[in-house]
Image: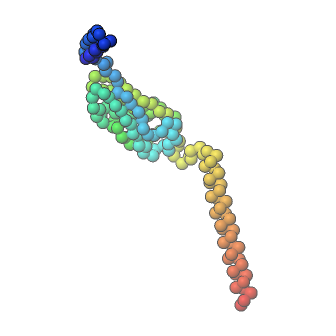
């Protein structure tokens, strides 16, 4: 209920309004991990994590239902390890149905690459790899020169 009292200094007015009811809403759902547009390796366990809020009730692990448009139902739980996702593009959905039948969901897209293939690399990854390879090559070259000089010096003394 809302109670309002207004006065202009001479006159006073009072009003009471209510009670109010707020319409129930479905659970608010969010997939925490994996991140959107992630690249995952096929047949490697993948940890799924979600969060949800329902202002009308406390949600249980059994209300968290995970699915893939490619592989079907994956299981239940706020945290779930999905085993052996098939290779390809997946739309992962976390669906929560509260005790009154109201449904909330969140969806992300991931790419599952075949086991043994490497995910597409960014130019930064290639630059880092190239720099490390060049540094190792230079280290081997310096060590080879040092060994050669030492053998040459040792050979001239004996």
Q: Is residue 88 visible?
A: no
Foreground of the two, 30 or 115: 30
Left or right: 60, with 148 as reference point: left
Q: Is residue 31 visible?
A: yes
Residue 97 image offset from top left, x and y in percent: 32, 27
Q: Quadrant of the C terminus?
A: bottom right
Residue 12 or residue 115, whichever sits in front = 12
How far across and how far down the image is residue 56, in percent? Answer: 28, 26
Residue 144 placed where, x, y %? 68, 72
Quarter assignment of residue 53: top left
**Where 139 sits versus 156, above or below?**
above
Dividing the picture into quarters, in which one does residue 30 lie?
top left
* Whole-percent x, y for residue 134 in the image: 67, 59
Q: Residue furthest front?
A: 10
18, 69: nearer the viewer = 18
| The image quarter in which residue 34 lies | top left
**Residue drawn 40% across the image and 28% down it:** 105
């Amino acid at each position: 209920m809302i109670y309002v009292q207004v006065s202009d200094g001479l006159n006073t007015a009072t009003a009471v309004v209510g009670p109010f009811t707020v319409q129930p809403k479905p659970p608010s759902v969010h997939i925490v991990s994996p991140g959107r547009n992630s690249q995952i390796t096929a047949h490697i366990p993948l940890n799924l994590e979600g969060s949800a809020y329902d202002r009308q009730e406390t949600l249980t692990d059994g209300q968290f239902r995970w699915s893939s448009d490619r592989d079907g139902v994956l299981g239940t739980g706020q945290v779930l390890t999905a085993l052996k996702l098939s290779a390809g593009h997946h739309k992962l959905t976390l669906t929560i149905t509260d005790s009154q039948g109201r449904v909330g969901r969140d969806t992300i897209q991931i790419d599952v690459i075949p086991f043994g293939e490497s995910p597409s690399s960014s130019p930064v990854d290639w630059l880092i790899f190239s720099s490390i390879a060049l540094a190792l090559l230079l280290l081997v070259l310096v060590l080879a020169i040092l060994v050669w000089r030492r053998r040459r010096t040792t050979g001239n003394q004996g």
